[in-house]
Image (cartoon, grey):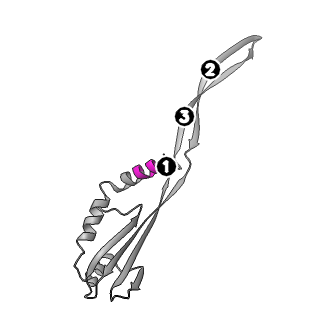
Amino acid sequence: MGKIFIWLLSLGLCGCATTAKFDAKLNSLLGQKEEILIAAWGVPDKEYLLNNGKKAIEYARKDTVRSGGHLYAYPRAVLHSGIADGKPFSGVSTQYVLETTPVQKYNLFCNTSFIINSSGEVESWHHEGNNCISR
């Protein structure tokens, strides 16, 4: 149930954002110079020099989404009874009770890494996480 809620929440927040569109944006960077990647994505969060003359660079994106904390009212029937003027009475009325939905926090992330070949071009990419999406 929780995973479905997160998926629906992500879908609602992102509209038409999809992993396929994210993959297409990454594919458009293949063969591009590293400078173009950095111009588009900014300075990488991590960088690794590999033994084969290649370089791996990584970008980490983290977001927190909060849901809940909304006030709502629901009706509750209240039974009244007693004695008035020496006569017993009873009746039902409706009261509206205010409650707040619980606040829940969801952590979203996407780690994207690129391999830069010895010519300084993007050779491949890889991503992992629950928020690797794009419009």
Q: Amino acid at mark 2?
A: Val
Residue 65, given in percent of the width and then of the height, sits at 47, 58
Residue 125, given in percent of the width and then of the height, sits at 32, 73
Q: In the rendering, which numbered label is found on residue 2?
A: 1
Q: Is residue 101 above or below residue 120?
A: above
User: Is residue 98 part of the magenta span, yes or no?
Assistant: no
Q: How far, Cα to Cα, is label 1 from label 2?
A: 38 Å
Residue 44, given in percent of the width and then of the height, sits at 38, 80
Neighbour class for label 2 at 10 Å: few (<14), some, many (≥20)? few
- Disc 1, SS: helix
Q: Nearer the viewer, residue 41 or 86?
A: 41
Look at mark 2 in the image and give the residue it sits on: 92
Q: Amino acid at mark 1?
A: Gly
The quarter holding residue 88 reads top right
Look at mark 3 in the image and give the residue it sits on: 74
Residue 60, given in percent of the width and then of the height, sits at 42, 72
Which residue lies at the image location 33% right of the left edge and 86% below the top edge?
Answer: 54
Query: How many discs mark residues in the rendered view?
Result: 3
Is 128 left, or right, of 89 in this rendering?
left
Residue farthest to the right, as pictured: 86
